[in-house]
Image: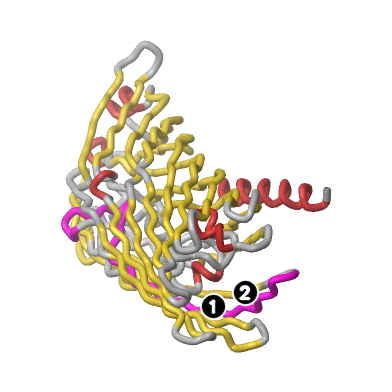
Amino acid sequence: MLFKWWLTAFLVMIFLLFSQNVFPGGFYLPEIATPGSVGTAGVANVTNVDDASSAITNPAGMTYRKNDEVQAGMEVLIPVNKFDSEIATAGGSDGGNAGVPAVIPGLFVVKGLNDNLKLGFSVAAVAGGGLDYGENFVGRYQAYKAALQTVGAGPSLGYKITDMMSIGAGVYMLYTTFNQKIAVTQSFFGANDGTVHFDDIDDISYQWTAGLIFQPTDRLLFGFTYLSKADIDLSGDLKTSGLQGAFQNFLGSADSITVDFELPESFAFGLRYRVTENLTLLADSNYQRWSQFSETNVKIDVGPGGETIVTGFDRDWKDTWHVGGAFKYHLGENHLVAMGISYDSSVVTNKDRTADLPLDEQFRVAAAFGKENPIGLSYSLSTSCVYFGEGKMDQTRQGERFKGEFDTN
């Protein structure tokens, strides 16, 4: 009874936190609020046979858990994203630190149905990004505030076929929300800027994953995962403020908006090698098809019985690749340390990068320390430092140009 009450309270807390915070950076987050993931820069995910978070990172890895397990984690993100403008024809500010601190929890459960079959359940941050430059930002006519966040929850199964091979699969319900604010120039009316606001448009969708673990020897283990694409159809209110003249006559009557795009499929491969009883080396790579996300369709309904505006645009995003390496070392008495580094290529070239999603290449360096206790309570702490690249932008929107890059990111 106590466990059921604690589980319910934790799930409520997760959804409250996600409804109030945004988190910076990229889309698919390699860190999933566990030290084995954060502390290895996500490198251990695809070969995860160490804890209950395998329920989402690679469901096949659950077959290595001898006992039923519950794992809870909490990430605190402290972003520093400072843009430095070189050209700003409309004037304005650079926005200071556009990053928004956030708290991201995660919950993972593994239950053995028999010696070979394991059932899992996960709640975790799947994807997200957010920046708030302030309403006087030099690039405000493209966007001055944007936040996309996706949380996933769902079951998974892992089955051990032989002592060398396990397979697994899971399906997750995704809840996605998107907020964006764009300034509208009205200088030709002699008026101040107006604002168009996509207000908490959201969607519930589904995504599935499949995994494989192959262990040819006691020392060597391979992992593979596939993540399907997900169709996101966000819909909600379109709000405006401060519009004048024709803008007010047209957009002032707009009452709803729909934004459609796809979260892309991903392929990941990893290996781990136990060098000694205490030292394990890990490596991983992945390929993510972000070109699938590139096309976005927008539909705006203007008032009861009014006009429906449908438009589509291409962000010119491209597929990305990732590579990483890490190690885990047992210090004795169940103490463990880990370190990892990783690199992700950029999804977009400098000329196509936009203020709402200024993604660039990513470098991660991470470390973790923990105490393992197979019977009872285990704990760990980890940290990850992520550099999100220069994020160079040179864009012209509503006749105004802004150019610059992030001097701290």
Foreground residue, 66 or 320? 66
Identify which residue is drawn at 33% across, 26% down.
300
| Residue type of the residue flagged with mark 1 | Ala
* Above or below for 354 versus 181: below
| Quarter of image, res 30 | bottom left
Residue 370: % across, % down = 62, 78
Q: Which residue is mark 2?
A: 380
On screen, residue 154 versus residue 137, left or right, reads: right
Work out whether residue 369 can be spotted. yes
* Quadrant in which the C terminus appears: bottom left
Dot 1 falls on a residue whose secondary structure is: strand
Q: Where does label 1 land, which residue?
A: 368
Which residues, given as a range, are shown in magenta? 349-375
Q: Is residue 131 visible?
A: no
Vertical arrangement, residue 381 with respect to residue 312, above or below: below
**Image mark count:** 2
Local packing at callout 2 (Cα closer than 10 Å; few below 14, some 14-19, many 20+) is some
